[in-house]
Image: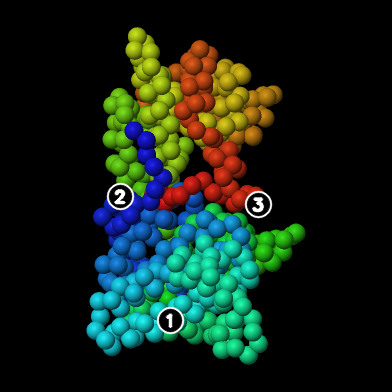
Amino acid sequence: MLLTDNPIQGADGDRYGFRAHADVLCAAIVATEDLPLTVGVFGPWGTGKSSFMKVCQDLLRKRSVPTVWFNPWKYDQKDEIWHALIQSVLTEIAQDLEERRLKGDLALRERMAGALERIRRLSQAAAWLLARRAAGPLTAGVVTADDVAAAQTALTEPGTETYLHVNRFEEDFKEVVATYTDGGRLVLFIDDLDRCTPDAAITVLDSLKLFLGEGACAFVLAMDYQVVAEAAARRFHSENPDEARGRQYLEKLIHFPYHLPGVSFESIVRHLQHKITDTRLAGSQELWELVEVAFEANPRRVRRFVNGLNLTAMSLRLNPDDPPSRRLLLHAGTLLALRMKHPGFFTALQSDPGVWTRFDDSEYFKTDLSGQDRALAAASPGVRRLLAAVSFRRSGFEFPDPPSPTEIRLLTQVLTVTGGPPNGAAATSSSAADGTPGEGPDHAA
């Protein structure tokens, strides 16, 4: 059984207690009179931001509040990303207005037709501002490639009404939103800003003010605060980033900072316990103690651990004459956690299996590590705590004694295939060139 990283899609799928908190935030958004409003949903990678916002979106829709969802990380270039943001919003509004126009009476059809024409002009203006980029594929059906070419020609003619329209973008967008929401509000969810390159992330934030800042909108932005603040700092001082300046930028932009409520480890256990295929481990207090010490209450990392453990257990059962013991599976779990959290230590174990025992002895006999072991401990902060947590000497648990060299060789060979890349490698391979995290879409995130 493999678990995905996909976010939950609505309030009914909430497994981590987000709904009560989302109810409060949604009620505040609906009650806010002074719009536009920008809400920052802050939380580290993998803690549930996307799922929390999906719960919010579902609750708002049940209140008949229109919403739009935008994922900026799909677009690499700065000019593409602001254009895609605008076109995504306009397209969703246009599709809904067209449905209303077809179903309404004459007066409603006329009002909707006027709004649709204004949307079309806005889309043309955005395409023109894209300035000869490949705008056609980004317009998502609101305006065709031929329209873009025609608009670029018309909009550059001095004195034309359409050229002046660019300067009225904010006001026209405000009127479109008013028509679309019947005087209410539009909530725009923007996910995974911290997966974007720094320039792209800041471009999205700038675009909200530059183009959409007059409409009756609430912008709900999911991000790791520290990552985006550092991106803003680099924007202002590329050579010597000023973190305080980056924080000030976010403080001016974000009207209400909402720090995602922590997921309880107990709720993670309840949700994932039955996902572990080996029944000897599913209810093992030793396994869940290992998981909590290694990954705390980070739903995404725990799910990835469960995936790796299930695959490892299946691989170890390939020899039906020698099924894996509970002892071996617990050691497989510890080695998997080490591979994910401390890849340097995992590599050292492959060449020197005795290092596990030496670390265990030093921790419980209160002796100092020496030589290469000391350097290894310094390079892998937290590894001694993890090994101490799963030590056979620990009272109250039944952890096995350290694995033999033969067991370590077997398990490290299997985990090289089933354990996936270490956390550090995953982040490096999928992140932006500047080092911002980008490890895939949130599950519970």
If you read the primary sequence from the N terminus, does the residue marked by circle 3 or circle 2 appear first? Answer: 2
Task: Look at label 3 and name its amino acid.
Answer: Asp
Query: Can you tell which mark lies on residue 177?
Result: none
Q: Residues within 10 Å of mark 2 (few under 14, many from 20)?
A: some
Q: Nearer the viewer, residue 91 or 391?
A: 91
**Image height of 133 relative to 376, above or below:** below
Residue appearing at x 32%, y 45% in the figure: 267
Q: How crowded is mark 3: few (under 14 residues within 10 Å), some or many (20 or more)?
A: few
Q: Mark 2 points at which residue?
A: 15
Q: Residues within 10 Å of mark 1 (few under 14, many from 20)?
A: few
User: CA separation, marks 2 and 1?
Assistant: 43 Å
User: CA separation, marks 1 and 3?
Assistant: 42 Å
**Image height of 218 relative to 200, above or below:** below
Q: Mark 1 points at which residue?
A: 117
Task: Look at label 1 and name its amino acid.
Answer: Glu
User: CA separation, marks 3 and 2?
Assistant: 34 Å
Circles 2 and 1, Cβ within 8 Å, touching? The answer is: no
